[in-house]
Image (spheres, rainbow, N blue to C red):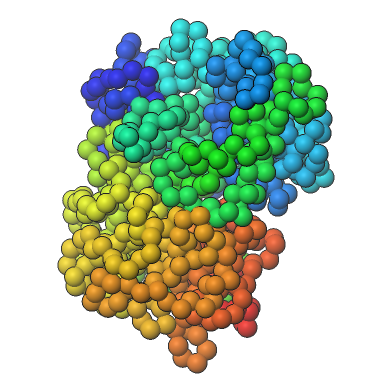
Amino acid sequence: MNITQRRNVSRRAVLMGTVAATAVTAAGCSSGSGGGSAAPPDRTRAVDPHATQSFAAAKGALLLQVMAHPDDDLYFMNPDALRLVEAGVPVVSVYVTAGEAVGQNWIEGMPRSRPDKPGYSSARHQGLRQAYAELLGKDRFTPWKKSVLELPGGVRAETNELTDGRRSARLIFLNIAMLSAGNTRLPQLWDRPYAVMQSLVATGSPCTTVSTYRHDTLVDALATIMDRYRPTVIHTMDPDPDYQVHDATHPKDNDYGACSDHRDHTPTALFTWKAMSQWVADTTRSEGHPPRFTVAAFRGYYNQRWPHNLPPQTVTEKHRFVEAYGGHPSWNCGNAAGCGDYGQGGDRPLKNRKGWIRSTHPRYPGTAVVAGTDRTGRLEAYGVLGLQAVRWQETGPGSGRWGEPQNLGGGPLAPALAAVKDTAGHHLVFGLRFSALEGQGRANSREIVVLEQRTPGGAFKPWQGLGNPEHKAERGRRTGPPVAVATPDGRVHLFVRNAGKGLSSRVREPDGHWGPWRSLHGQEVQEGLTAALDRQQRVHVFAAGRDTVHHWSQDDPGKPVQHMPLKGLPGPGGDRVGAALGDDGALTVVYRPPATAEPAAHRLRPDSDATEPTAGAGLRTFTGYGALEAVTVPRRGGRDSLVVLGRALDGRVQLVDAEDGGSPVKAPDTTVAVGSPALLADADHRPCAVGLGPDAAPWLWRPEPGEGA
């Protein structure tokens, strides 16, 4: 984010994409393209969108998280991180800033003291050790092994390590002062050429030297950490937070400028994405193979602005670790500077009106893979590895085994693709590309791209840029990942959420020509769109808003898609909704209402804007959290059945026949999902779940006949 307000400071062409990036910074908002002195020579090393080398073999699953402050992971990335640690995945968590703020670690009842930034930073480090010890199943005051990590550019960082059997955690504190000399903060380090920041030495740290960070120093440090630990999953923060109107109804609180996030969160995410791209480029060049990893990005203060999406059971689970981090001044933890971030201790996070703890929102909602079948009946799946699009194919119809990933290039891509098959049988794959990610006053832009087969089942054409519905690059960064649907008339409809939080669309005509971007209007919705066809082959798009699930559709097949509000829905959805044809042939939407473990299901009445709740006997015990997927499969006896996939309260993948009164079926304990799994009906018309595991490899789960659905 820029700390000053700048306008129209430069304009340049983006060579990596097909759109022109306007180097504009929205007033007081995000880390975009800066102004001031001339930018230093461009030394960006980034993913080549044309590169298609095969991937390196993963040596074992590992989760790497990069945060701005101590506690960002606990508030914004859990329970996702918890599920991986529970599965035995080692975790390395990197904290970019010292989190020292004003240096006051105080709660009511404590005597006032003079600000102590090194002490407060140390207390927050101790809070993290307490939280992660509990995360590993250890006593919160378990001693950690502390050491110093040497990084490029002469910088040094503190590391803390704790192991408990097959579980392990490593905390890395770069400890860059939130406010460095010359009033320099992270937004300027991203934006301004020649900006410099310094690290803060925390009380009691084994790292006793002050390190100097420039823009490239931080990128190199993060890329080196990635190369050293070789993660298969990387958790990042939100590089492009939503715009947010601040008024009496929506107070600014901790938001920065016109965006719904902290000023340190955004540049930390941008530095992380740039480091990932550099790591992929350097590893591909030096080793001949890109690293094999997947990415999940998480919203920050966005949680305050939308309905909460976690049920009470999950909030309680999440609060356990935040409470351990917050600590209390009466605790005897062995750290003289303090035993946690006291303002976050006790039940304060639960009482905080900002509600950060009550949600976990992915920045790029969608399934980790999109799956379908080819002409032979084999399953195939598309996803993003190493910031590049990949395709996996089942070794044979029904084999349940995947071949090696085929690198389709196109990167650097956000981790949410869309894929459809047109009426001629061509596969089209859509993605959101970081078309420029340079910083230091240079371009920072995003574009929608598509990959299309030349012939059905054959090779692919080169990636094609479809631009962005927003004309300014700064607004274009808020464009979300694409969803698409193919219709029997030969058209392909593409949809994205735009910077205004509404819906934009492009349509590919039957002759292959793409029409212009068009705004479909409607009220503000959350990221995470769902597109489906009804029995009449009309397009429907659903998205969760603040007040209800919003809806766009057609009057008749072939007509324009337009905003068509629905009546009868009880309220908003907390996450992305699922949609499929129900038992009676009506299109049915399933979603979790805010802060609720039980799903709701509503059918759309044919040729009407009215909806009505369905019986959904199978959904009554389908408690859990997160997004839902739905698909129609034939049921025994010749009737169609609506099958729903989601996460149980314990995080396991589960599936249920929505109309049947049977209990949900849970996937095996070994089926661990990163992000949301996909659901489809295979060539034998059986429900099939496909997901991505923590080892960056796809898994496949077909419930045995007689189990649930």
Residue for point 72% across, 25% down:
329
Q: Position of residue 120 (x, y in %)?
A: 64, 19
Q: Position of residue 445 (x, y in %)?
A: 33, 34
**Quarter location, residue 35:** top left
Residue 304, relative to residue 375: is it above or below? above
On the rendered structure, is 526 left or right of 593?
A: left
How many discs mark residues in the rendered view?
Answer: 0
Quadrant location of the C terminus?
Answer: bottom right
Question: Which residue ends up furthest to the bottom in the rendered image?
Answer: 637
* 351 vs 583, nearest the viewer: 351
Q: Position of residue 160 (x, y in %)?
A: 73, 28
**Quarter location, residue 600:** bottom left
Residue for point 54% across, 76% down:
618
Residue for point 31% across, 59% down:
550
The answer to whether residue 302 is seen in the rendering is yes
Residue 241, relative to residue 490: is it above or below? above
* 492 vs 559, nearest the viewer: 559
Q: Position of residue 109 (x, y in %)?
A: 66, 24
Quadrant location of the N terminus?
Answer: top left
* 413 vs 559, nearest the viewer: 559
On the rendered structure, is 635 left or right of 245?
A: right
The answer to whether residue 410 is seen in the rendering is no
Question: Which residue ends up furthest to the front in the rendered image?
Answer: 109
Residue for point 51% across, 12% down:
180
